[in-house]
Each structure stands twice: as structure tokens, then as C-alpha cells.
Amino acid sequence: MSANGTEQDNGKEIIFKLGGIASEPVSVTYEHGANPVKLDLTFYGDFIPPEIQALSASPKYILNDGEDFSTVTAKVVDDSGIESVNLDLTSIEQGVVSLKSEGDQYTYNIVSTVPGEFKFKFTASNPSGNSVVDTDSISIIVLKESQLATTFGGSDGVFSSEEIEALVNNNDVSSGIKYAVLGAYFADGWDRI
């Protein structure tokens, strides 16, 4: 291996890592232009990242009222245990959040007041510092109430009884959206369906 640096790096410690785990007990310092050195490196720890066995968000469509939600569920396993399971919600102005755990099952309810289509980065790490990242599985669409007719209604922007029935039976749509549509088109909402 080579350690690239400049004369300004002279005296800086070089740490060798394997899967995020530093070698023990070897520690060397950088010397610009020095001859190669032979080292025996020993690493102790878990070098295998956690495994995501299941990961999803449901429902896919939620209302941007800050109360309606999509539940992220994940099953993450690792022989060494799990140190952290996080979801990056920066795109909806909530930062990085930790998922709640029950054994190897993790959950989090995403709420948003920011409308749009979003994919969220999911990261799970074990105590040795190894992590697994998924950037494709958690995808939701947050809608304003004014977008419901154009998203789920006909091209005329008005709901037919068939479209409302299809919406009510669609598991990808939150109860908040269903209630908003029914409330807008029927005075007694749920009782009519």
C-alpha cells in the first residue's frame, strides 16, 4: 500500500482500517519520501455490514398537513447487533432521524408539510462501524389538498363515483387523503362508501 502526502503531512499518524476497524496495535507516522516499511497488521472485529432483509414505506401518498403519515418499516440484522438505524429526511426539512426498534424491526412515521416526490436515504450501522445504505426503497409523494383531484380524479379534475371507489380501495393512498376527498365531495363522507 502507499500513503500519498506532501511534506506538510510529515509526522501525521497513519491509521490502517479494514471495514471501518482500525488495526491494532500498529501506528506509524508519515515521512515524505521515506523508504517502504513492512508492517504486520492485525484487525479484530466484525467486517460484515448489517443486512437489510425488508424495507418499505406505506402508504406511498400522504397529505401535506403535518399529521398524515407514511410508516417506514425495516428488518435489519447483524450478528454483532445494530448500533443505529437512520433515515435522512433533510429534503422535507427534518434532518436525520433515528428509527424506533423492537428487536430487529424498525419503524418511523414520516409526516410532512412540504409537498413533492421524495426518496429518502436509509442507513443501518453495526457497533464496528460497518454500515449499509439504501437510497431507493423509501419513496413517498406528499400532496397538497388542491392536488388530489388532478392526481386521483379524471382528466377533468372531478371525481366520478368509480374514481372515488378506486381511491378508497387503494392501499398506496393514506387515510388522510381518502378522508379529504370524501369530505370534499360528500357531506357524510365515509358513510356513503
Image: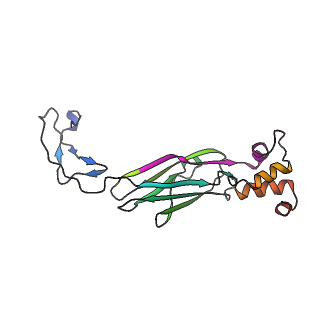
At 84% across and 64% down in the image, what residue appears?
191
Residue 142 lies in the magenta-colored region: yes
Number of labels in the image equals 0
At 51% across and 60% down in the image, what residue appears?
99
Q: Residue 47 location in percent, x, y? A: 31, 52
- Most extreme residue toward the right is 187
For residue 30, what is the image quadrant?
top left
For residue 79, what is the image quadrant?
bottom left
Split into 4 quadrants, where in the image is the C terminus? Answer: bottom right
Q: Residue 110 location in percent, x, y? A: 60, 56
Q: Is residue 190 left or right of residue 58?
A: right
Q: Is residue 72 left or right of residue 2?
A: right
At 85% across and 51% down in the image, what residue appears?
161
Which sits in the foreground, 142 or 104? 104
Q: Is residue 121 above or below residue 81?
A: above
Q: Residue 162 location in percent, x, y? A: 83, 49
Residue 70 lies in the magenta-colored region: no
Q: Which residues are magenta?
A: 132-156
Q: Residue 181 location in percent, x, y? A: 80, 53
| Colour mapping used in the image | rainbow
Which sits in the foreground, 184 or 49? 49
Q: Is residue 29 left or right of residue 73?
A: left
Split into 4 quadrants, where in the image is the N terminus? Answer: top left
Q: Is residue 158 above or below residue 186?
A: above
Which sits in the foreground, 173 or 142? 173
Which sits in the foreground, 59 or 6? 59
Q: Is residue 142 left or right of residue 3?
A: right
For residue 184, what is the image quadrant?
bottom right
- Most extreme residue toward the bottom is 102
